[in-house]
Image: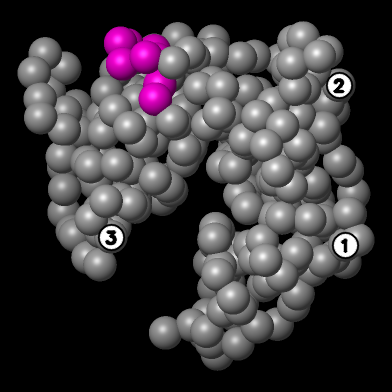
Amino acid sequence: MLSCKKEPLSIETYQNDKLVCAHPENHCFDLIDMIVSKQVQSISNRSLKKPRGIAINSLRGEAVAVTDVEKLNKCSIKIFDIKSGKLAQTIAFKTHSEVDNAGWCEFITYGTDDNNYLYTVDSWKQKVMVYDVRYPDTTVLEFGEKGSEKGEFSNPTGIGYLPTGGVCDVPSIVIADWYNDRISCHDAKTGEFLRYLMVDQDMGPSPVLSPYDLKVGESGTLYVSESSTNYVKVFRSDNSKHEVIEESN
């Protein structure tokens, strides 16, 4: 068991043997060595208010992207160099409308290690927003709206990236659609809805209940945390579907 500071909210793996853990109440995120079960680094900054989501791109200058959610309609992405702990870049969450800023953006993911795209979910406005860190003044793609039909969300939360192959034939973004009790899969380039995961496309029921956060592991293995059951469910990928292979709380 690893000991973390007060209320660790989001975690991400780093270099296979380390965890990066966000602590919104302590205004920092920590680097934990899993082999010795010890914190080896704590990164904070005067501008870092409430770090929540974490995404790591190890090939892009050891960059750690953190969503900083101060309050509703006041959030941003802050990118740190994990080795030096220094703040490298801040991206203000803005939509296509200059007066319509993002509402509540908590979860975040990189596309691939050599990709400059960052994907984040706005749970308040029921949409996914995509930023290019090289041109951060506005989004390069937005998709989604409130509802329960295909391509719609009801309080979307966790987000992950699936590379080509496995469940979908194109690079895809998977989204935990919390209130709709489902995981939806979208084309990473266009935002087009592709399919639901872990559910028959014509009839249910879905094996996930209130999915909150998710992580994509090696070979497309999907880890989903459920807020209503306190379970973490693990789904194995093949060319047609995901299957539950483990449930633990």
Residue carrying label 1: 45
**CB atoms at circles 2 and 3 under 8 Å apart?**
no
User: Gap in Å between the C-alphas at discs 2 and 1?
Assistant: 22 Å
In which quadrant of the rendered view does residue 19 lie?
A: bottom right
What amino acid type should be assigned to the residue bearing mark 2?
A: Asp
Q: Residue at x 60, y 87 (%)?
A: 38
Mark 1 secondary-structure assignment: loop
Looking at the image, can residue 41 be seen?
yes
Q: Which residues are magenta?
A: 147-154
Q: Earlier in the sequence, mark 3 or mark 1?
A: 1
Residue 153 located within the stretch drawn in magenta: yes
Residue carrying label 3: 230
Residue 34's place in the image compared with 18, above or below, is below
Looking at the image, can residue 117 be seen?
no
Q: Any mark on residue 140, and which?
A: none
Residue carrying label 2: 137
Residue 88 located within the stretch drawn in magenta: no
What amino acid type should be assigned to the residue bearing mark 1?
A: Asn
**Residue 89 image offset from top left, x and y in percent:** 88, 43
- What colouring method underlies this structural image? one colour
Mark 3 secondary-structure assignment: loop
Local crowd size for mark 3, using a 10 Å CA cut-off: few (<14), some (14–19), many (≥20): some
User: Gap in Å between the C-alphas at discs 2 and 3?
Assistant: 38 Å
- Observer-nearest of 153 and 13: 153
Q: Earlier in the sequence, mark 2 or mark 3?
A: 2
**Residue 186 image offset from top left, x and y in percent:** 43, 19
| 129 relative to 44 in the view: left or right | left
